[in-house]
Structures are given as C-alpha cells and as structure tokens.
Amino acid sequence: MSSSTDSPTLTTETTQLSPQPDTETAKPTKKITLKSSDNQIFEVEESVAMEFATVKSFFEDSPSSTDIVPLPNVTAKPLSQVIEFCKEQIKFKANPDEAQKKKYNAEFLTEKSDKDLVDMIPVANYLEIKDLLDVLNQAVADRIENKSVEYVRNFFGIDNDFTAEEEAALRREHAWAYEGVDED
Amino acid sequence: MEENQMSLISGLPDDIALSCLARVPRKYHAILKCVSKRWRELVCCDEFYDYRRMHSLSETWMYALCCDRYGKIWFYVLDPNESQRRWKCVPGLPARALNKMGMGFEVIGKKVYLLGGGGWLDATNEVFCYDVSRNSWTQVASLSTARYDSACQVYDGKIYAIGGLASTRSDPYSWDIFDPQTNSWELHSNACAVPEVEDSIVLDGKIYIRCQASASTMSSPFYAVVYEPSSGTWQHADADMVSGWQGPAVVVDGTLYVLDQSSGTKLMMWQKDKREWVAVKRLSTLLTKPPCQLAAIGKKLFIVGKGLSTVVLDTSQTGSVEGAMVGTSIPGLITADKVLNCKFQTL
C-alpha cells in the first residue's frame, strides 16, 4: 500500500503544515532527489516522495541513504505529471474535501492527451501509487468507450493480427454491438 | 495468460492492462474483442469477469426466449442501463433448438443453458450452452433423460431440472442436477418429486414447484411442492402461499411477486410474515400486453409481455400505497411474439 499513513511521523508533520502553508517554506522540509531514466533530476518533498511505495521501500531498506533515487523505468515527462498529481493529493489528505478532489482529478485528467494518460500508467504502476493507477485506468477506459476498433488500436498502438476474413467474421458476429459507435 | 506472448498494451504489465480494460462497459466488449487476438482472449477469459465482479464493475443484462407464431424460437438481449433501451435479437441459435418448446432456460456465470424441450412424443435430453463472451453455442452433456417443461432453476452454482413429463422417460419422479465445473448431470429420484410442472421459483434457498393439479383427489386447484437442495428433502408448500400463485412469479430481493392475469394484470406480493397476498399494483393490459413473464434485476421488476414489450417497476418504492411504484417501459418488437422465459445475467 502506498498510503503515507503507514508512517506516523510523516502524517503528523503534514497535518501540522497544511493549515498554514506559509510555514512550509519557513520550516526546512526534507527533499528527496529522484532521477528519471533520461537523466533528469527531480527534487520532491519527502511527503510527496513517500506517496510512491517504491521510493518509500527504497528508504526503508536503507534509512540513512542520502543518495539520488534512480528510477530506471520512468521518463521525465510522465514522472513530472505524476509528481504534480501527488502533490495535490497530499493537500487533500490533510484537508479532506471530496468535491474539490473530484474536481481537481477531473481537470487534471481532461487536460492530458491520450498519450500522456497511457504513459503515466506504467509510471504509477512502477512507483506503486494505487490511487493514481485506479484514476488513470478509469480515465483510459472512459476515453475508449464508444469508440471504433480502429480508434482503440491507434490509441494504444496495437497491431491488428487478425486476417481480413477473421476480422470481417468478428464484425458480422457483433454487428448489433456497433450501433452508435463514434468513428473518430 | 502466457508470458511469451505479446503484451495486451505495450509497456504495461498484463494485469494492469486488464484492470484498465475491465472498466470499459459491457456493451463495448464486442469492440474490444475485435482489436487483436490477445484482446479477444482477454474479453473471453474468466479472469476478466472475476476482476469486474470483485471491483463492482459487473453489469446486468436480461436475456429472453420467445417464440413466434410459427413456433420458431428466438433469443433476445436487453441492456437495461442503455439510454435508448431496446431488445436486440441474438442470432445463431443452434438449429436443433429452433423449434423446441418447453426448453429449460438458465444462466450460470457467463453461460446461458437451454435444456431439453420438445413435446410429449419428441422430447429431448440435449443441452445447448451459449457462452456470452465468445458469442458461441456448444452442445454440452445431455440430461440423463428427456425432459420438457421441467422446473429449471439454479441453486448454488448448479442447475436443477426437475420433472418434465416425457413419454420416453423411465422415471417420472426424478430430477437432474448439472454441475458446470464437471459438465455432468446427476440423476436423482424420489416419490415426492413431481412429473408435471407449471412454474417454479427459488425462495429462501428452496425450489418451489407449482404443479398441474390433474389428480381428482386434490381439493384445491393449486398445488405446489418444495424441494430443499441443501438437505435433499421434499415438502408440500404453504397452501396460503400457493393459493395466490396464479401466474408468472419472481423473487425480488427475497420477496415473492406474482402477476395475476386472470382479469386484467395485477401485481401481487406475498407477505411472508402475515402469510397474506396483497395487491401491489394494477396495470393496464394496453401497457403490459399479456401473457407476460416476470424477471428481476436488483430491486427492479420487469414485466415482459407480448412482443417483448416491457414494463419496469421499482419495488423499493412499494410497501405503501398502491400505484406508488415508479414505472418505465421499453418498446416491444414486431418480430418477437410470445415470451417464454426471461433471465438476467451479471457480467
């Protein structure tokens, strides 16, 4: 589980901090350095980094480590988006507001391109951020519903491995399922 | 799933791809199946439906068996959550099931079964199975004996086919239990079992079977027996309950409803605690188009009439004043005629 509530010290800290955001800058918060596979360096607050179960267990295994955490499977762009999302979720964790959270999540997803969404899924999976993974899976499922077969193939970059006859047969078989499908 | 195959979605582990695709609503599954061979396998595999069930993503559709005026059997499906709800014909019924009346009709998991059927002289023991995800029909293990108009019900993942008179049959007081895991039927018999069946329901873990009261010794024209699958025992049903069971019946959320079609259509509810029948709602026959069959999804009761013309009532609104049920209707079809049976399936 990726929830930071596993770590009592951290939870207290974030709860104290968030009602007065100004103290955040006043008090030196520990930063964690992450390195993406394309060698970009990200400095994130410890509370955010601890949302990533993978990073968290890295520090649990070597508590005194001050090293840069290498993320060999993660490129910079989706990583920056994932960090952006998790930063906001920390705020909601301290100050629960379901309506605001829903609104933020919806806006966050709407402004992402199809590719951004699909690229973030392996990152969320590798970093083991379960909440984000659920949100992304649902967002992708929403984007492909009511779309044509070609659209779905393009969306994920999937090669059609059916023969023309096989595909024609499948389409005939499910003719009634195609009514009202959005072709774009 | 084999590992050496290409991944479902490139760059994603298959379990993540599954948790994404399982969120796509059921009506688009046919499209997912056409994307690639691996996607087709995914949408046909049990894991896909296990995931949907465990994450409360399952959706319930209704299946109906009808016959037209030439006696030909038709198979229909309805997605009750669609904005433009309408019944659609599912083509491809096996030729040998096309003209058989009295077939048992049951659903287990993603499979629909058609059992036996025919008439007094040509009853059969054949069983056909429709795999909804694969959209294909296969013949599965046959009943131990020919049955038509049997009491056909599912209890605890097994199909019970009870009675169903057929001239060629050896023991009229018998029933068959089908285990889909082993694809086999087990024959049972007991002198209390009934050969001639009118209707059946499952209520409180028991199978209630309404019988044709052919015996002249019967004081009441209505007669029913109860079979308890867990103990294998037979009993007579509560006479008060049976007295009101005068039409198609359905159990909604543990409560028995019957559609009385003797004069107009009237929905009756059995009050278990008071052992009394109460009229819940009177419905216009212009709306219900009798003869009707009943089915239920959750707390919603479906009254399916001629041509699959359907009235949906929300039973969570009942219990108070007559007529308080909120009803909507789904248009019928010209092709379908008489509705034989309706079953729902959650996938």
Image (cartoon, helix red, strand yellow):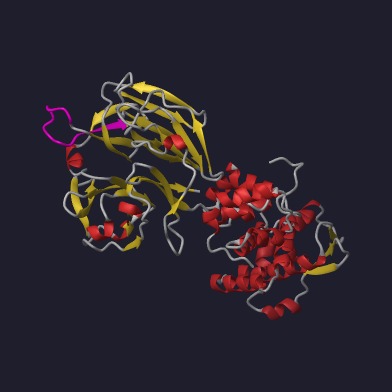
Q: In this view, does B82 lie above or below B242?
A: below
Is residue B201 shown to the viewer in this render?
Answer: yes
- Left or right, residue B161 beside residue A25: left
Q: Main secondary structure of the magenta part?
A: loop
- Left or right, residue A80 beside residue B265: right
Q: In the image shown, does B255 or B26 lie closer to the viewer?
A: B26
* Rendered location of residue B346, percent (x, y): 47, 48
The residue at the point 35 percent across, 27 percent down is: B122
- Left or right, residue B142 beside residue B133: left
User: How many marks do you count on the picture?
Assistant: 0
Which part of the image, by quadrant, shows the N terminus of chain B?
top right
The residue at the point 33 percent across, 47 percent down is: B339
Q: In this view, does B204 lie above or below A81?
A: above
**Which residues, given as a range, are shown in magenta?**
B214-227
Q: Is residue B224 magenta?
A: yes
The residue at the point 66 percent across, 62 percent down is: A151
Occupied quadrant, residue B116? top left
Q: In the image shown, does A24 or A108 lie closer to the viewer?
A: A108
Occupied quadrant, residue A39? bottom right
In the image as oriented, which residue stretches furthest toward the bottom? A22
Q: In this view, does B318 lie above or below B254?
A: below
* Rendered location of residue A27, percent (x, y): 75, 75
Is residue B156 shown to the viewer in this render?
Answer: no
Q: In the image shown, does B67 or B274 lie closer to the viewer?
A: B67
- Left or right, residue A164 beside residue A42: left
* Rendered location of residue B53, percent (x, y): 53, 48
Q: Is residue A58 magenta?
A: no
* Rendered location of residue B21, percent (x, y): 62, 54
Q: In the image shown, does B241 or A41 lie closer to the viewer?
A: B241
In the image as oriented, which residue stretches furthest toward the front? B70
In the image as oriented, which residue stretches furthest toward the top? B170
